[in-house]
Image (tube, rainbow, N blue to C red):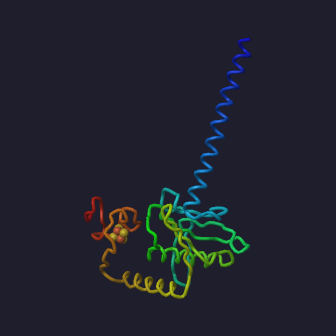
Amino acid sequence: MKELLAITEALRLWGIFAVVLVIAGIGLTVYQWRQRRAAGWGQSLRVRDQDADRSQRGGGTVLYDPTRRIFGKPDYISEERRGGRLQLVAIEAKPTRRSKTLREGDEMQALIYLLLLRATWPQQAADVARVTYAPGFGPFEVKATPEALSRLDQHLTQMRLSKTSRAVARSHNQAARCNACSMASSCGLQRLTFPNKKG
Ligand code: SF4
């Protein structure tokens, strides 16, 4: 009788454990679905590559476009069914940005990723890239229009000219950006450190 009670108790505990697991699984699935939806990934089938979620720099694949001599790593590359075929879409994710309009810098960054995808996978690259902001803001699609490409080329020319200048002024006043910047160790006096002091 004792053994029967022990088996019944064990089964009851396993039953509870299984129910908790199922509920947790459903919760996680719903959470991920909501996150993806908020980020504008409703049609995404699969994330092929990602830099954003990796805690260390160096994640993701560095892509190169020889036409404009640009390198870059999109935050995400998603596979999506667009126009009846599977296409690759570069995603620039700014999950904390709360802006109803697309910022120029983000547009240019996404445009660069779009060109990088085209150079790397000409048959599969979509004709748009996407910028996602905080839930309720965006997402925005970026296209390689002649006007956008012209602006990008102007920015690239400016950047290349800056590279040969002896001193280039910092274009922002945000210590957080310097803190996350891969050039911080060689930046010198322009670099900001918390709390917003030069360091
Ligand atoms: S560390 Fe230097 S290069 Fe990097 S964001 Fe700050 S000022 Fe710009």
33 or 195, nearer to the observer: 33
Q: Quadrant of ligand 1?
A: bottom left
Residue lying at the far left of the rendered structure: 197
Q: Residue at x 49, y 87 (%)?
A: 150
Residue 80 position within the rendered picture, expressed as x and y whole percent measured from the top left: 66, 68
Residue 187 position within the rendered picture, expressed as x and y whole percent measured from the top left: 33, 70
Which quarter of the rendering shows the N terminus?
Answer: top right
68 or 108, nearer to the observer: 108
Residue 186 visible in rendering: no
Query: In the shown orientation, is residue 58 left or right of residue 28?
Result: left
Q: Residue at x 57, y 62 (%)?
A: 50
Q: Quadrant of residue 21?
A: top right
Q: Residue at x 55, y 60 (%)?
A: 38
Q: Quadrant of residue 168?
A: bottom left
Q: Residue at x 71, y 12 (%)?
A: 2
**Taking 38 as reference, is 165 above or below it?**
below
